[in-house]
């Protein structure tokens, strides 16, 4: 009964994963796949010396931790809102989840249209209220604005996931505990910090790690909107791997970047799990 | 539902609000309104743009609401581009993936939930671990693998890859749902003379419907939305899917806003319908699967 699922998983995830390590040690080229030669760690040595590798490493860190932090904080507030009693709650819970289910390309183009320097809605509104004078703001073409703009879009798309996961945890908090906290004289703020938060903590921690992994690997948005530019300002590690493989044709180098990405994530997850376990014991 | 305690949490999040009951609902409705506008705004703006005539679109003084709304952009999209083919490709891929994933994950989830065998835990965690592999790591080797199998630029190749990538989550989801079905029901069916196969078809299948809906929706949304693999593994319009088709309207020098927005509206429709349909089960499955994982 297990075999159909396992065959598909082994054939199209496990086997390529192992193969990725092999390819990263060769000089495999997009145009000539058969003439690959074993080159040892050359791809890695070459990569570590490059400026674009260091740029993409830094951008990846900012992108991943920045996005998840904002999504967690806003998503938490959102979950508290959704957990309150109001009219049309079921419908609104569905509506706010929409960005999460929207194709990344669609998200990218909706925002591309809003952020367009000349025709876009955002610059129009800014001009209408007098906040923007002179040259229109090029949100995605400005060296300093491009990454924050992309991050804002990803945060917009990622908030619902946090909100819904935390909402599910909030609904599991026993009513009796909240009532007894009230009877004991705790105010709402104290109840939240001392009673609710510890109870939803396991879900929050798991959501954070799922989201960290997902965000670190997510580069669809960046690929469509800026393709790493201007001047590598939005180049992240996975995007660097993609560009090296398919724009540069260097499959070996691209696979090496992919392996680095996987190793860094594995280290992050292991470290995170250790911290979580330690805090549980303490 | 813990409705009686809900207002407390509202205060928890906005402690400055006085506790008199009449005051409570006001700030929250404002917050909800702001949230809804923030979420739906971009979609609505896209829909409005899709019915704005080209002449008004590029006018320097853009007005919010088009003065002569028309559906010409949709007509041009269908006659001048291969977008209909992209939609057909996406539909074929997504539906096939749903069938494969639901079938395989229902079997695997049932086996993992019901039977105790050596290495069960190992299999469970291996499946979870596979989910965490970065897709960028697999992009190059998958390209080579599909090329060797002659499945590049082929819908079958996309179907296999998408099935693999939505399989682990769906299996966990399904296992969680089967866990919640009491084993006594099956035992009763077996005592009443059902065969194992019959009890699966007549008892397990109907009872795991919410799980099937959730796993199916997840697989559908994943396949409909996926971009990087589709972009990399397809080169002609015989296999390009909707996200790839959409991305092509963003040219080097010119962006076809009329195509992008009308195509975007069409691409959003199946997601809207599927999502509204199975949202509840998906959320429940997502939450329970993650907490247990």
Image (cartoon, rainbow, N blue to C red):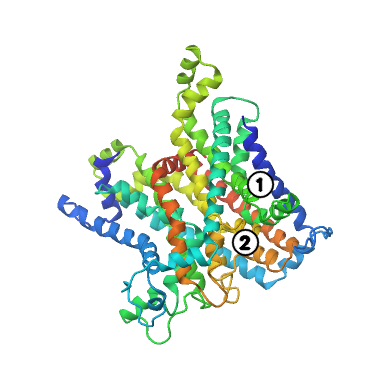
SS at circle 1:
helix
Q: Bin the neighbour count of mark 2 within 10 Å (Cα to Cα): few under 14, some 14-19, many 20 and up.
A: many
Q: Could you tell me which residue is drawn at 37 percent across and 39 percent down? A: A172
Closer mark to the observer between disc 2 and disc 1: 1
Q: Kindly identify which numbered label has been placed on residue A238.
A: 2
Pinpoint residue A103: horizontal percent, then vertical percent: 49, 57
Quick check: do tags 2 and 1 share a chain?
Answer: yes
Closer to the camera, A40 or A33?
A33
Q: Bin the neighbour count of mark 1 within 10 Å (Cα to Cα): few under 14, some 14-19, many 20 and up.
A: many
In the displayed structure, would residue B187 be above or below residue A241? above
Separation of marks 2 and 1 at Cα, in angstroms: 17 Å
Pinpoint residue A138: horizontal percent, then vertical percent: 47, 78
**A256 lies left or right of B261:** right
**B163 lies left or right of A139:** right
- Chain bearing mark 1: A
**B247 lies left or right of A192:** right
In the displayed structure, would residue A145 be above or below residue B237? below
Closer to the camera, A208 or A226?
A226
In the displayed structure, would residue A96 be above or below residue A281? below
- Chain bearing mark 2: A
Closer to the camera, A82 or B60?
B60
SS at circle 2:
helix
Pinpoint residue B222: horizontal percent, then vertical percent: 52, 50
Q: Could you tell me which residue is drawn at 40 percent across and 57 percent down? A: A73
| Residue placed furthest toward the bottom | A134
Report which residue position mark 1 lands on.
Answer: A13
Mark 2 vs mark 1: which is more N-terminal? Answer: 1
């Amino acid at each position: 009964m297990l075999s159909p699922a396992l065959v598909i998983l082994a054939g199209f995830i496990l086997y390529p994963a192992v193969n990725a390590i092999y390819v990263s040690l060769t000089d495999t080229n997009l145009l000539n796949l058969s003439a690959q030669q074993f080159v040892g760690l050359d791809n890695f040595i070459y990569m570590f010396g490059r400026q674009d590798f260091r740029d993409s490493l830094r951008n990846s860190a900012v992108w991943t931790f920045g996005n998840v932090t904002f999504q967690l904080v806003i998503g938490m507030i959102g979950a508290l809102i959704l957990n309150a009693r109001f009219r049309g709650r079921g419908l609104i819970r569905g509506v706010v989840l929409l960005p999460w289910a929207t194709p990344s390309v669609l998200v990218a183009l909706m925002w591309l249209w809003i952020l367009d320097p000349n025709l876009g809605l955002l610059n129009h509104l800014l001009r209408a209220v007098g906040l923007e004078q002179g040259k229109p703001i090029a949100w995605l073409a400005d060296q300093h604005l491009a990454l924050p703009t992309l991050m804002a879009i990803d945060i917009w798309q990622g908030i619902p996931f946090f909100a819904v996961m935390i909402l599910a945890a909030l609904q599991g908090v026993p009513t009796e505990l909240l009532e007894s906290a009230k009877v004991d004289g705790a105010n709402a703020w104290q109840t939240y910090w001392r009673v609710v938060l510890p109870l939803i903590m396991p879900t929050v921690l798991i959501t954070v790690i799922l989201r960290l992994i997902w965000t670190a690997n997510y580069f669809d948005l960046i690929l469509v909107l800026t393709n790493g530019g201007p001047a590598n300002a939005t180049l992240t590690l996975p995007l660097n791997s993609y560009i090296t493989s398919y724009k540069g044709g260097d499959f070996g180098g691209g696979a090496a970047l992919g392996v680095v990405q996987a190793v860094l994530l594995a280290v992050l997850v292991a470290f995170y799990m250790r911290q979580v376990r330690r805090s549980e014991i303490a | 539902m813990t409705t009686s305690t809900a207002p407390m949490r509202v205060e928890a999040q906005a402690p400055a609000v006085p506790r008199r009951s009449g005051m409570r609902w006001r700030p929250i409705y404002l917050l909800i309104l702001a949230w809804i506008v923030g979420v739906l705004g971009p979609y609505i703006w896209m829909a409005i743009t899709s019915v704005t005539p080209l002449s008004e679109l590029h006018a320097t003084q853009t007005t919010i609401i088009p003065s002569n709304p028309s559906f010409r952009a949709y007509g041009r999209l269908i006659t001048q581009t291969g977008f209909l083919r992209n939609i057909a490709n996406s539909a074929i891929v997504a539906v096939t993936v749903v069938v494969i994933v639901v079938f395989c994950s229902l079997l695997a989830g049932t086996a993992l939930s019901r039977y105790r065998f050596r290495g069960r835990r190992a299999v469970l965690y291996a499946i979870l671990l596979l989910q965490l592999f970065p897709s960028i790591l697999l992009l190059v080797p998958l390209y080579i693998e599909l090329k060797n199998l002659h499945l590049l630029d082929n819908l079958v190749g996309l179907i296999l890859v998408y099935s693999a990538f939505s399989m682990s989550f769906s299996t966990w989801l399904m296992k969680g749902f089967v866990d919640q079905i009491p084993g006594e029901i099956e035992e009763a069916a077996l005592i009443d003379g059902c065969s194992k196969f019959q009890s699966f078809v007549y008892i397990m299948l109907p009872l795991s419907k919410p799980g099937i809906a959730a796993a199916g929706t997840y697989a559908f949304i994943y396949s409909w939305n996926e971009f990087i693999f589709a972009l990399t593994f397809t080169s002609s319009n015989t296999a390009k899917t909707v996200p790839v088709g959409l991305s092509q309207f963003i040219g080097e020098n010119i962006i076809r806003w009329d195509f992008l927005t009308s195509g975007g509206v069409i691409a959003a429709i199946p997601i809207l319908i599927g999502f509204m349909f199975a949202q509840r089960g998906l959320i429940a499955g997502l939450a329970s699967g993650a907490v247990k994982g």
